[in-house]
Image: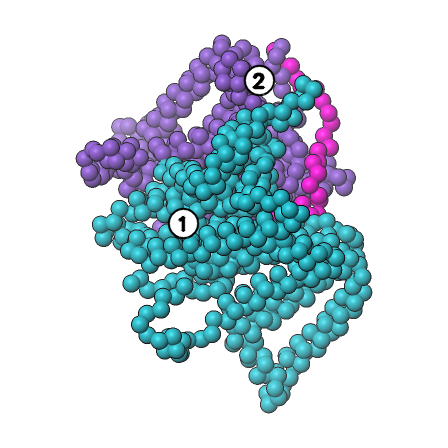
Amino acid sequence: MAQVSGSEPSTPGRVWSRWAALRPTARFRRQLVQASIGLVIAVAVISALTFVFGIIILQYAMGGLVVSSIVIVAAIGLTVLYGIRGFANFAYGDLMTLGAYLALLLSLNGLSLIWGAIVSFLVLAVVGILLEVVIFSRLEGRGPVPPIVASVGVGLIIQNGIRSVAGTAEWIYPVPATQNIVIVPGLGIHPVTGILTLLVGLAFVISAHVLLKYTNLGKAMRATADNLELAKATGIDTKRVTYAAWVVSCSFASTAGVLLGLGTAVTPTMGFDVILLIFAAVIVGGIGSPYGAMLGGLLVGLSQEMSVPFLVWLERPDVIGLQFGSAYKVAIPFIILIIVLIFRPWGIAGRRPAFARRSFFIERITRAVGGERGAIETPAGEANGGR
Amino acid sequence: MASTGSAGVAEQMAGRKLPWSEIIAFVAIAGIVLAGVIAGVLAGASPQGILTNVGFYASIAVIFAVLALGFNLQWGYTGLFNAGIAGFYLIGAYTMAIAITAPAPPIVIGGIPVYPGHLGGYSLPLAVGAVLAMFASGAAAAIIALPALRLRADYLAIATLAFASILQIFANNLQSVTGGAIGITGIPKPIEFVSAEAPFLNAITIVGIGSAILLLLILLLQFMAESPWGRVLRAVREDEEATMALGKNTFNYKLQAFAMGGALMGLAGALFAVTLGYVSPSSSFAPAVTFSVWVMVIVGGSGNNRGAIVGAFLIYGLEWLSVQLKDYVPIALATGLPTLRSSLIVGGVAIVVAAVLLIVFGRYQPTSIWPRVLRKIRERGWVRNGVIGALALYALGWVFVLLEQFAPGAIGATIFYIRLMFIGVLLILLIIYRPEGILREHKRVLR
């Protein structure tokens, strides 16, 4: 590492070694190259689509970005908990609904929506700690399934509690009705549901990045998610980290719920309806990896919204005459999820487990067809460069 | 279905405790049916109508029992967690409906499409439809399991949950196949009766067919579970890597178990289509169905076929009873509210007195009876649970009274949601305190 070599006293290279820490590492350069390739591909795809479908595709891309920013906030919260506590929180969507309803309750009682969102952020943090203390701490070390069952129970209680208290009607947040801001003809963005959502999403991404990268708590969280036993052995208070994960997870859920309610309406099933999208983002990004969740959320949200023109095209009688084509857009994340599960189950940004076979699914097919048996490859190249 | 060996029954029973939890479960089921019958009598229904209603309970409970058996094969025996039971159920129901109904062309009245029609209308025999339904659901289960089975249990849960919700969207929107939001109606009954007593006779036939299928299934499943194949499944559940090391191709076993469980769920869907006479993408295939089946299997003890059936009759019985009593709860609360409140106050005084007696005498007068009672509460698990349960019931009574005081009529209106919340509470409590189930331990020595 650069720092180690630079700490040697009075070598000729001492003059610039002060800046050695800032020199991009090989890993960072690789990531930079990957990111720019991804960006170029994305821009190329979007321009090609714009060329084919017209300016309308940019409108869908904008909608996709807005959806992505909600999904990313939720997916970061879900994946942090997933990484540290090791189970899929099926109640996550309902926690989002709870946050949205709390903000609604406060905003109907005179507070502004922003204060409502802040209070619901804090309340949900407390709810998260309570959930861990009352329920989930008792299920530690019993595998992934019992916490899933318990979280479904929590979700049922929240969802139906809301239904019986607040009714099943749709609620709209009291925000001033404004027109879309027109950027170019045919392409506009709403100041509240568009720009505000994007900004809040960006703020949460940045704060998650700062928390994870530059604070001791964040480092402890990453270490715990990476290897629980090793983190315990190095003296990290994993109990505290677990509580912090619940706080981050549930408070992010509340904000994601408020953003979701801003975009559409507040209903008892609004969170449960998007849980699939969020799971897809988390798995596509790699479970337990917040940066993967950002990438996965972007991919899933964009592809869901931008598939609409294609599905509408399928509605034409001379193509296949599909009815209600745009209703199927929620199937797109599922398809992405299945593809990722087949070819890259550890996610696009997650770390490949050392024992993973190179392509187990393809190998299985070839074996079934009658190829040679066995041949378990050890990913030798990955062992060095995997970190 | 304990296998009776060469030893006499008396010798087998000697030294064995009475299966109290099973007896309680059966008494509870009988009580549920009795309460439903009483509700029917109070409503002034004819004896035949009451019997039809009970028959409806039995036929739907049989369907849930088949679902629970399928999930038990997947989770209880093999350890594969399926969160998309409702999806496989839906496939079975629609396959059955498409296979056995008569052709239904689209209906257009005055240029407005009223009914979009649906695929099929092949008018096949019922048995063929059921086999097709099983095949379709089993194939779907195998396809969804292929990528997910290799991975951790939660990937399978997420993939199946996603599959189920996608299927509901397809059922709602793929109108030319499924008939859209209206669904498929006019599904033929096993025997078409034309008399005025047709509903009653239909209920009787359905219950007869359903129980015959259930009996066959439990014999078959018990045989399969005891066979070498079933032993491998349980070995996979306990320790997959060790089973692999024994030379078993665990992936194939898991795939077979998952597909067979899916096929059973398809059979349940086929039964559902015939029982109700229509299928629609309504709450019948909502995720709540999946969660109810989980509760049934966990109550019955995962890995215990008989328990799964008892759990299905018990949990669906509660749902049925909540529908039967829906009209009576508000009336009973309105009339009985003062009585309930005063009895709760008296009960509260009694609880406080008992607590004071327990604590004061328990501490300062060790010779009296109270220290012994206190010790029993501390040490005997069932006494402690009984005390906790009584306190919980007491708190529930106050919740009812206060709710009725401040929001009259809310309980009657929200009884459906309260039932789902109850299922949620049950899931959490069971998975924390009794993961092996109420009825019987499922862990046995692998023979």
Question: Could you say which quadrant of the image residue B17 lies in?
Answer: bottom left
**On-image quarter of the N terminus of chain B:** bottom left
Q: Nearer the viewer, residue A212 or B387?
A: B387
The residue positioned farthest toward the bottom in the image shown: B367
Q: Chain of mark 1?
A: B
Q: Nearer the viewer, residue A228 or A79?
A: A79
Q: Nearer the viewer, residue A40 or B406?
A: B406
- The chain assigned the colour purple in the figure is A
- Magenta stretch holds residue B325: no
> Which residue has dot 1 on it?
B74
Can residue B390 be seen by looking at this rendering? yes
- Give x and y (percent) for residue B320: 62, 54
Nearest to the eye among marks 1 and 2: give it.
Answer: 1
- The kind of residue tagged 1 is Gln
Report helix, strand or loop for mark 2.
helix
> Which residue has dot 2 on it?
A59
- Give x and y (percent) for residue A283: 43, 36
